[in-house]
Amino acid sequence: AVDRRQQLLVGSLAQCFVEHLLEWQREMRFALLAFVVMPDHIHLLGILTGQSQLSEVVRLLKGRTGRTLNGLLGQSGSFWQSSFYDHAVRREENLETIASYIQENPVRRGLVVDPSEYPYSSANAVYGEQMLGWQWLVKGDAIW
């Protein structure tokens, strides 16, 4: 979540975060399945395919994007809250159901009527081919 739940992830800042996220997934070998960038927080669904621990992967994403987004705002200090919430998907849970839940966030918040209308989400068709997770599940390590 954004520090003090400020609603900063809108417009060009939200777009900048999405661009960093799409680059970061390849670098960190994080098979991104779904995401949404809400004004004050983000949701990610993915599979760790490299050797890094989740805490390290998230720390690197938050550090890099925090510096960049602060720079765009002309400020310094903490951009993100220091902690994050994670949930290990259990075998019986359906990845498509979880992805849909993530992508429905803007609808539940009343920002759009249909998830595909929200510009900063994996539900937006623009990002379909850029997310590596579903390709990884089908093809294995070939995408790296």
Image (cartoon, rainbow, N blue to C red):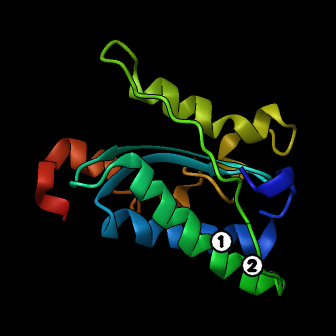
User: With 52 as the anchor, is 70 left or right in this view?
Assistant: right
Q: Is residue 81 above or below residue 85?
A: below
Q: Residue at x 34, y 55 (%)?
A: 30
Count of numbered circles on the image:
2
**Label placed on residue 66:** 1
Q: Is residue 135 above or below residue 21?
A: above
In this view of the protein, can residue 118 be seen by the observer?
yes
User: With 7 as the anchor, is 91 left or right in this view?
Assistant: left
Badge 1 crowding class, 10 Å Cα cut-off, few under 14, some 14 to 19, many 20 or more, is some
* Residue 137 x, y percent position in the rendering: 23, 42
**Label placed on residue 8:** none
Q: Name the image quarter holding the C terminus.
A: bottom left
Badge 2 crowding class, 10 Å Cα cut-off, few under 14, some 14 to 19, many 20 or more, is some
User: With 70 as the anchor, is 134 left or right in this view?
Assistant: left
User: With 110 as the anchor, is 76 left or right in this view?
Assistant: left
Q: Is residue 100 above or below residue 48?
A: above
Q: Nearer the viewer, residue 90 or 96?
A: 90
Q: Which residue is mark 2?
A: 70
| Marks 1/2: CA–CA distance | 6 Å
* Amino acid type for the residue under numbered disc 1: Gly
Marks 1 and 2 in Cβ contact (< 8 Å): yes
Determine the image quadrant of residue 67.
bottom right
* Residue 99 x, y percent position in the rendering: 51, 34
Q: Residue at x 40, y 17 (%)?
A: 93
Q: Residue at x 49, y 45 (%)?
A: 34
Regarding mark 2 in the picture, which secondary structure is present there? helix
Regarding mark 1 in the picture, which secondary structure is present there? helix
